[in-house]
């Protein structure tokens, strides 16, 4: 007899980007309950120091732990690079980041072994993708590029604008002579820019949505630890939280998830992660 | 700093079928070391009782544990259905079966929510696939069919023969009016029959190779537990063992893996699984 665990899965991000991960969770794991928090008040995370991102990540994790989650998904590449190891060690529940799944997917897809990675400054500076990819296959060539303007395009709801097209085209010029056949969208905000990015890179380049790939790992770990939700258990309500005003969050979230989202505003600045005995 | 673990990953099957999983491991995880055992002396497992398959599985696991593996992959659906829960509980290392990954992949792929599953009598009788699939999405319809003749076609190296074509076509008639858009190859021997099965089912039906899907989970757990092999560590030699004569094993293995395989003959009948303190 399986154990089952009907608690929610927690997702956290600096802003709306993590919703690209949530959308995949709703699709692949329709029975699971989702709690999401976006720290929009302190966005963007990309230019911040690793120590600061780690502190903010601990605050988001503390908020979700109080909501009694069974698993934590760091649906943000910058926070994964800065805080995954720390949170894995401290929390008594499984903690999953987006970098390993994205790296695995890129390695599975590439044919010419030339992989591009785009992300925030924090993610690119951490070299987390290079390390994860080369640890599995050191014959691969990785080209990483920080795209500091992309997150703001998404958070300001300008991700379909002509400005977005111009910024993306200019930024990705870097790849013109790199001959990559695979590009990792190493920031969970970037899938909202996907049509533009694909257009600039050309149809022959495979884009890897690190967040969507992550749900495969979430699903595998739910099975591995026997903590999937009981299919016959009560339906529970998903909940969305933002540290800033919900208005713009709701607008982007509702567009992206294709149903009406009503986020709740919350404070997390003063929270401290209580380290468990298991930690 | 990552922990790393340079020990081998153990794979076990009733015969050569598990090599379809090994092939994917060699492709996706080229740095890892593989130890494989096929219990060809007591093949096929399909018609045997669950208790007997569990006993045989424990003997194979005991053999691999003595070789000091870091992870065990039950590369056999029949043995997964009969022994996964038991071995997961008893062994101090991660143990992975092929049924959960196959089920997840089928759910990801199906559009009309009608999924076929083919496997041995043991696997089909266990209802393990139905249970795994419906636990995640109870709106799906699952059609399961035991194909008792398929394993012998593969083990006798007749898997490309006209006899194989006839047997597969006759057996799969069952699906004629079932309108499935996805078919799980719920036995690791079946990927060797894949071209014939695809031909009979038609191009529009997506075949899921449960074994190949399993390597995604293996890779995810290597990352999750920080036990991937150090890319800069010494290269180690993969090893193949069979409980019967190596001649026919080597022939099929070399064809399938596309390099010369020299299996060693070994005895496992008298082995007992020593239950660890962690178990």
Image: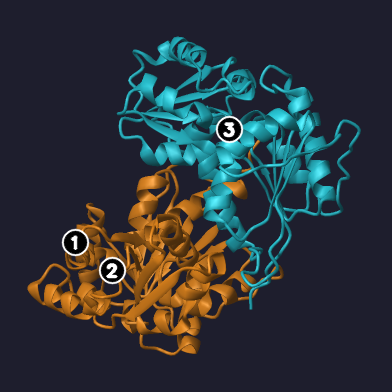
Chain colours: A cyan, B orange
Of residues A41 and B162, the one nearer the viewer is A41
- Let me know if residue A135 appears in the view: no
In the image, taking residue A197 as reference, residue A202 lies left or right, namely: left
Discs 2, 1: same chain:
yes
Eyeballing the image, is A62 above or below A174?
below
Residue A37 in the image: above or below residue A69: above
The residue that mark 3 highlights is A188
Using the image, tell me which numbered label, if any, was put on residue B252. Answer: none
Whether B217 is drawn above or below A143: the answer is below
Q: Residues within 10 Å of mark 2 (few under 14, many from 20)?
A: many
Q: CA distance from mark 2 to mark 1?
A: 10 Å
Does label 2 or label 1 sit earlier along the sequence? 2
Rendered location of residue A76, percent (x, y):
64, 33
Q: Which of pointers 3 and 1 indicates the residue nearer the eye? A: 3
Q: Position of residue A19 (x, y in %)?
A: 61, 38
Q: CA distance from mark 3 to mark 1?
A: 38 Å
Report crowding for label 3: few under 14, some 14 to 19, many 20 or more residues within 10 A (C-alpha): many
Residue for badge 2: B190
Q: Which residue is mark 1?
A: B195
Residue at disc 1, secondary structure: helix
Q: Residue furthest front?
A: A260
Check if mark 2's residue and mark 1's residue have beta carbons within 8 Å. Answer: no
B160 left or right, relative to A81: left
């Amino acid at each position: 007899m399986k154990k089952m665990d009907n608690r929610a899965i927690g997702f956290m991000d600096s802003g709306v980007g993590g919703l690209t991960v949530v959308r995949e969770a709703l699709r692949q794991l329709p029975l699971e309950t989702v709690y999401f928090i976006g720290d929009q008040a302190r966005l963007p995370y990309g230019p911040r120091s690793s120590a600061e991102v780690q502190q903010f990540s601990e605050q988001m994790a503390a908020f979700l732990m109080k909501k009694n989650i069974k698993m934590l998904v760091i649906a943000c590449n910058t926070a994964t690079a800065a805080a995954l190891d720390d949170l894995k060690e401290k929390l008594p529940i499984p903690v999953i980041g987006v970098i390993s799944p994205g790296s695995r997917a890129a390695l599975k897809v590439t044919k010419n072994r030339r992989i591009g990675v785009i992300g925030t400054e924090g993610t690119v500076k951490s070299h987390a993708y290079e390390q994860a990819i080369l640890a599995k296959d050191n014959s691969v060539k990785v080209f990483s590029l920080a795209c500091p303007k992309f997150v703001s395009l998404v958070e300001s709801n300008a991700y379909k604008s002509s400005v977005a097209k111009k910024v993306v085209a200019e930024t990705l010029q870097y790849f013109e002579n790199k001959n990559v056949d695979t590009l990792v969208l190493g920031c969970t905000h970037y899938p909202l820019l996907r049509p533009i990015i694909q257009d600039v890179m050309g149809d022959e380049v495979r884009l890897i949505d690190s967040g969507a790939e992550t749900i495969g790992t979430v699903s595998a770990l739910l099975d591995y630890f026997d903590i999937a939700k009981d299919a016959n258990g009560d339906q529970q309500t998903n909940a969305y939280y933002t540290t800033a005003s919900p208005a713009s969050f709701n607008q982007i979230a509702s567009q992206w998830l294709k149903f009406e989202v009503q986020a709740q505003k919350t404070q997390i600045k003063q929270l401290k992660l209580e380290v468990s005995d298991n930690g």
